[in-house]
Image (spheres, grey):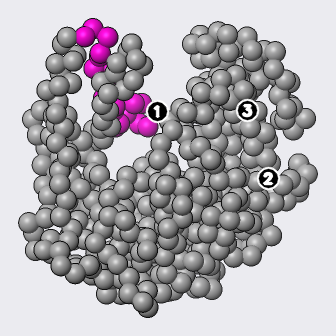
Amino acid sequence: MCFQNLPIEFDAQGRPHLKEGAADPYAYQKREIDRSQIEELVKRNGHIKDIDIDPVTRVAGSLAFHAVVDLEKRQVLEANSVASLFRGYEVILKGRDPRDAMFISSRVCGVCGGVHAVAASLAIEMAFGIAPPPFGIALRNIQLALDFMLDNPLHLYLLAGPDYSQIVVERTNPSLWERAKKTEAAGAEIHGFKTIADIMTALNPLTGKLYLEGLHATRVPREAYSILFGKYPHPQTVVPGGLSSTVTLRELNETHNRIIRTIDFAKKGVFIWEDITDFFYEADPKYKQCGARPKNLIDTGMWDDPYAYDGTYKNAAEWGDRRWGTPGVIIDGKLVTTNLHHINMGLEEFVEHSYYEGWENEPLRHRTDPAGNPISPHHPWNKETKPKPTEKRSWKDRYTWDTAPRWDRHVMEAGTYARMWTTAAAAKLPHTRFVEATGHSMKLHAPKTLLPAMEFEWEIPTEWNA
């Protein structure tokens, strides 16, 4: 049984249904935040401070953080994250021609627009009963892979890399910098940097060798992306059913050439970041506790099997299990389901602290999914986006344009690590020459390119941190 908190149980045949006897099975209690105690502490104690980081410009400026911190005990007493921008794409799309959805939704972001276009395509395929041909699915998989080939160097070298650079480390932690100058880099034979300090210097923003290489490495997959999908970051050829353009052998060869170049840079990057991580952990094992949090992760999977995906909700559990990125939910470090129906059943979204009207008093659209499985009144399918801004931000009441999504009432983490974890733990990955899921790890077989063939293994971590 995968649900701990929602009132769903399974019969002997594995069919889900609501538990009997509950008058309001999806009821919940709002957690009241007593701000008065916090405010009194701030007044009486000079070492307790309100701290605001607004905006966080590394993500385009529409994110902020608020915290109440005990400087003596070095503890965070209260924290809030704030989405300061109303996007409203659900409102914009309402009443539009469905064929506009890919082009409008991809404007959500200047980095991840491609995945929003694909999500819109998948939704329309399911709504209209469209099953793409195998080649269309394969091309969509390439598109999603190119998105990640761009995201990796963008994050590692341009966004996160400066945190580990010489100009930051030397200024904020001089003793660590001195240690870095004396520590040899284990991967020097591959990446060419003799010491950890050399790597840190190469990560200096705007001038460092790795920073500039990372900048170029984001261009190469952009070029490949534009060849097949029109332009980046807002693709023009992604439509329900596959692609709206003809793809020639020449275009595939040009794309392949750029993918190979990206793989070479990725191989080098593995050794660079292994060296940095090992250095920090050896310098102070407490770094392993930075950002430590519950092992609760969720992912719907990615990269469909061209011969299994049919776009139907009825068969979603089957074609989901055939994805090369396995869907799944991890609770307390344990895989509890890989079934897309179960993943969907457990979803809820709450707006008590958001600038939106609730929809719990509206007529209920869906009590079940198309397969007859129960879903919550708070499920996103029962949601309507109704903005309700307030004149003043209140940490006790409403303070963000974001919402609070939950699975089985758990706070979850999504993203690439979640996908790797669920894929590794499930060990359902279809056979491929390049990736193997073992139940406790992912083995990666990187083919020979300009650099020799290499074997890597990502193991499910025992400590989950930042």
Locate residue 56, reporting x and y percent.
39, 30
Say which residue label 1 marks.
58
What whole-number distance in Å separates the C-alpha atoms at marks 2 and 3? 16 Å
What whole-number distance in Å separates the C-alpha atoms at marks 2 and 1? 30 Å
Disc nearer the start of the sequence (2/1) = 1
Observer-side mark, 2 or 3, equals 3
Q: Which residues are magenta?
A: 45-66
Question: 29 or 397: nearer the eye?
Answer: 29
Using the image, determine if residue 16 lies above or below residue 285: below
What whole-number distance in Å separates the C-alpha atoms at marks 1 and 3? 25 Å
Q: Residues within 10 Å of mark 2 (few under 14, many from 20)?
A: few
Is-magenta flag for residue 60?
yes
- Horizontal placement of 395 versus 4: left or right? left
Q: Residue 83: in sight, yes or no?
A: yes
Q: Residues within 10 Å of mark 1 (few under 14, many from 20)?
A: few
Say which residue label 3 marks.
278
Residue at screen point 68% across, 15% down: 176
Locate residue 52, reporting x and y percent.
31, 24
